[in-house]
Image (cartoon, coloured by chain):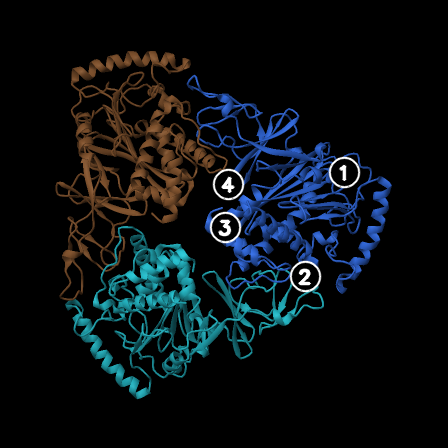
Chain colours: A cyan, B brown, C blue
Amino acid sequence: MPPQARARVRDAVARRATGRSLEGPFYTDREFFDVDIEAVFARQWLFVAVDAELPEPGDCTTVEIGPYSVIVLRDDDTLRAFHNVCRHRGARILDPGGGSTGNLVCGYHKWTYGTDGTLLHAPSQPADFDPGCFGLRTVHVRSVGGLVFVCLAEEPPADFAEVAARIEPYLRPHQLRRAKVAARTDLVEDGNWKLVMENNRECYHCDGHPELLRTFFPTYGYTEDNVPAQLRPAHERYLRADAEMRETYERLDLPYALIEELHIRPTGFRIQRDALDLAGESFTPDGAAACCRLLGDLATPRLGHLALHMQPNSWFHVLGDHAITFGVLPLAPDKTLLRTTWLVHQDATEGVDYDPDTLLRVWTATNEQDARLVARAQQGVSSPAYEPGPYAPTEYQVEAFCAWYIARLREELQR
Amino acid sequence: MPPQARARVRDAVARRATGRSLEGPFYTDREFFDVDIEAVFARQWLFVAVDAELPEPGDCTTVEIGPYSVIVLRDDDTLRAFHNVCRHRGARILDPGGGSTGNLVCGYHKWTYGTDGTLLHAPSQPADFDPGCFGLRTVHVRSVGGLVFVCLAEEPPADFAEVAARIEPYLRPHQLRRAKVAARTDLVEDGNWKLVMENNRECYHCDGHPELLRTFFPTYGYTEDNVPAQLRPAHERYLRADAEMRETYERLDLPYALIEELHIRPTGFRIQRDALDLAGESFTPDGAAACCRLLGDLATPRLGHLALHMQPNSWFHVLGDHAITFGVLPLAPDKTLLRTTWLVHQDATEGVDYDPDTLLRVWTATNEQDARLVARAQQGVSSPAYEPGPYAPTEYQVEAFCAWYIARLREELQR
Amino acid sequence: MPPQARARVRDAVARRATGRSLEGPFYTDREFFDVDIEAVFARQWLFVAVDAELPEPGDCTTVEIGPYSVIVLRDDDTLRAFHNVCRHRGARILDPGGGSTGNLVCGYHKWTYGTDGTLLHAPSQPADFDPGCFGLRTVHVRSVGGLVFVCLAEEPPADFAEVAARIEPYLRPHQLRRAKVAARTDLVEDGNWKLVMENNRECYHCDGHPELLRTFFPTYGYTEDNVPAQLRPAHERYLRADAEMRETYERLDLPYALIEELHIRPTGFRIQRDALDLAGESFTPDGAAACCRLLGDLATPRLGHLALHMQPNSWFHVLGDHAITFGVLPLAPDKTLLRTTWLVHQDATEGVDYDPDTLLRVWTATNEQDARLVARAQQGVSSPAYEPGPYAPTEYQVEAFCAWYIARLREELQR
């Protein structure tokens, strides 16, 4: 962190008031953005892909994390990740997008790497050239229940293994490793990555999501004490659905308890199995499943949704019939990529077991609605007249996100 | 102002030579641009709209002043202005453009403000939430003879009331509050805002304005002593027209004396009622009025033009038959918005009393010609080989603009 | 150089390891780019045009060198160069592109300069105005064998005259001053200017140039000791062709000896007359001449090519039938203009003596292939995970370029 940026960040961190939104420069300033890359995206475990994108040995994909480019690759049974940078003169090795590869060959001077990253061949070198010194630089990678995370740091946060162990039992019944990618969308939002995350962490704005609210209870984030009067009927429905779901979960031996550790650890997360409205099966107009072939070996679609939220860059809805993953990647202070992936059972057939339009409709609409809200927020906080305002109680997960984020900056400032 | 910018600005201000153009970085550098926003646009009274845009209670418009967005709104009889930023999480409230509004509702979480800026409703707040603390942040606003000015500073320049009092008698006969907007154009010029202003402050370049020069005397800015030989015939015509106009002004009791205080006060201005060539009524090929219905209760169109120039961002031509306002708003070091508004009597009917093409032709052409000149100037001063050059005597108002501007920077450096 | 940039550049220069590529910020950082303009492009002699573009008195062209714009003009027999900036308020005088001009008239206020740069007329000035103080600022310009170089520095590198004297005998037989421009292309590459230069300085990547390798020996840059096994057949062909060419050069009294002083002087250069494969005459599929009318008074096209490489921004291939010049101009840290010009004898007729498609094919394809490689390199070195890697022996001219460049930065840091 350059000295001048360090001073500005330190002062802004010191001024941060709990329960209020962050100051404008956190969202708009290039220096703060660079600090975010350094302190968050180059330090933490990040969700970047799904195992289902890489089913076969040699399958690979690339992901851009701020200025970094990373190759994720299945080397026989092992997932591997490398910096997408040739060790010769630094050329990018793989183009964006996925595919299948044998050796990794740099297109500039044909330096050739194995799928384990070792340099196999560099033409026309002198006798004392040691290829062992020029393998691809590795990146930590780990699959958790079919979700692929990487960490750019040399020493990743130590608590990830524990978090993974607590998450996996929830994910296991859905067998996402045996899923296939039904669709993937990339949406570039006109806002800072933190505004995209904050928007995800509350349903205070859910009036703007008519499609989602068919099945998603708008009382999410409220408590018995503070659920507003106009949401009381929905709350009553929720209580009934919740009671029924708990019976189902107990009967099927599905883990469902809420764990909420969003800001008290480096690998902040929240997980909960929860009811949906109407048919209670999926994000569709009537709540019925969008895919006939269920995930894993599940026997019933009426399971509500498994909601997983992770810091700093992802959330997930895992249903009986499909799963949706959301990954957030920063592009610029005011540009963010939201990558959404829909997974169905690997044997589900498009047009037979599921109609893609129905499968994608709700979250495509919801993402676009959120993108418009995020853009409004970005425009507003860009004014020097903007001052941090107070979070409502139902926005406590936004506060948790900000608290987690500020803690990461504090750590970085102490390095 | 960041310390590094402060040092650079201080040195450049100290080097400024009277009678010469400004050094390159004033026009090209992002740091200097940010200082301009801080020292000029966030401090001074700015022309941003006309009353005629907001005739009815609830009518509103927004204006972008550098990174600021401001709502201007008619609340019953009172003009009000607010920062266009929700007090919750900072979302932009109103989209660009004008309209009519009841309450101001933020599209993100439905925080709702009255037209006086008070927070009327914020959903789902705890008992101790005090809406009185979260009204919209106000911006100073003042109408002068139908021209709307705002000031973003907490303490606006104290001399504005005095200047307004001196200007209003000149404007009063034209009754711009009873006018309507016949047309408005937004032109983005590829140059720094100061180049746009400087270009407006001299007629040394007027050879490039054939349409304008049908009626606008090219001797503007020259004196008896220095009017060049080739402009002598025009000067003779001017002297005759001027003598006739003075008689008319005296007869009709219209204020016409030149007041020129462009750089000796914060609210620098110049006002003068002056003759036009040919029919002497309007900016048309033959100088005849472009609108049959005259402004206010005027009985004759042969009044020349009332020319008003104000620092830092506006100029005006008020005629017997119509008025044209010009507002300059900085977008980037090398991008500037010029907003031009044509006003006619509120009872004038398009196609009957005036032909929009005729009304707009001269100044649309002139603006475009000026934009090309400004772009050339921006390109040239971007070269490190550019050195400030000498102003000719006829460019004394450009010097006045620069002197006013440098004085504002000096003030800012002393804060 | 701002203090902060100076410190960063000084540290990066100190860390530079011989035989390895440069650190990432040299290619990606705006501050380093600005230093390159200051330390290299505003100091050194730069190839910017050919005499053949300016055959007649009054012919002129403009060239953009980073933020500078320069007019190059033939004033009777003398080449002249000026900053393209009016001495009044700095407006750009000539638009991009070439043409023919009498006086140079600024489009803003009609200040008028002669073709020798003197201010001939500035309207409406006071009596004490001295036009002698406001001539156009001159730029050093020099033609070497028909190639036009400019230098923005007040005191150009002193060794240019000596280098010119050593180059001219090689160029003389081709008489480029009597050539005409058959074609010119501008290619904007998505990479730093140094990556464009480095790419030109080795044939380690030449596998990617199938059209070029029809006649260009891929052994370029290798030595007897390190030519790889798979290039042995080509090397054998080269040795035979080289022996024959040497006889030809001796017989025709054409200078051909290799001079290689790429990094040991400010005006670094390399010159060599060398064999081509197949017919050995030109860059065509079969190596036969692309133009029937030979350059100068040459009697045979079978002359291989005269290869001239100059620091910091040019290279040249001069053949019996035509010549190709390559000039590199920086646009942004990650954008570079490559201007390629094809010259044929001034009496050669398009469609009769040469087919433009055939003439341009090889180097158009080669340039586009190189542009893709440069873009890959730019993408890769933009990752913070990039580390400088080792040059192979055949990349010794890349090392020479970097060593020359680092020496220039060292000089600048000592000013």
What chain is tagged by disc 2? C
Picture layout, residue C137 above or below residue A69: above
- Asked if residue A369 can be seen in this view, the reply is no
* Residue A354 sits in quarter: bottom left
Question: Dot 3 corresponds to which residue?
Answer: C6
Which label number is shown at residue C392? 2
Which residue is tagged 4?
C67
- In the depicted structure, whether residue A217 falls above or below residue C265: below
Please, what secondary structure does the residue beneath circle 4 have? loop
Q: Quadrant of the C terminus of chain C?
A: top right
Kind of residue indicated by mark 3: Arg
Amino acid marked by disc 4: Pro
Discs 4 and 1 share one subunit: yes
Between residue C88 and residue A103, name the one nearer to us.
C88
Whether residue B202 is situated above or below residue A92 in the rendered picture: above
Which image quadrant for residue A120?
A: bottom right
Q: Chain of mark 3?
A: C
| Circles 2 and 4 on the same chain | yes
Q: Residue at x 21, y 25 (%)?
A: B293
Label whose residue precedes the other's in the sequence (4 or 3): 3
Marks 1 and 3 sit apart, C-alpha to C-alpha, by 41 Å
Instruction: Please give the label number shown on residue A340.
Output: none
In this figure, which residue is indicated by the disc labeled 1?
A: C169
Element under disc 1:
helix
Cα separation between marks 1 and 2: 33 Å
| Amino acid type assigned to the residue bearing label 1 in the image | Pro
N-terminal label among 1 and 2: 1
- Left/right placement of residue C358 relative to residue B211 reads right
Q: On the image, which quarter does residue C228 sit in?
A: bottom right
Q: Residues within 10 Å of mark 3 (few under 14, many from 20)?
A: some
- Marks 3 and 2, how far apart at CA: 31 Å
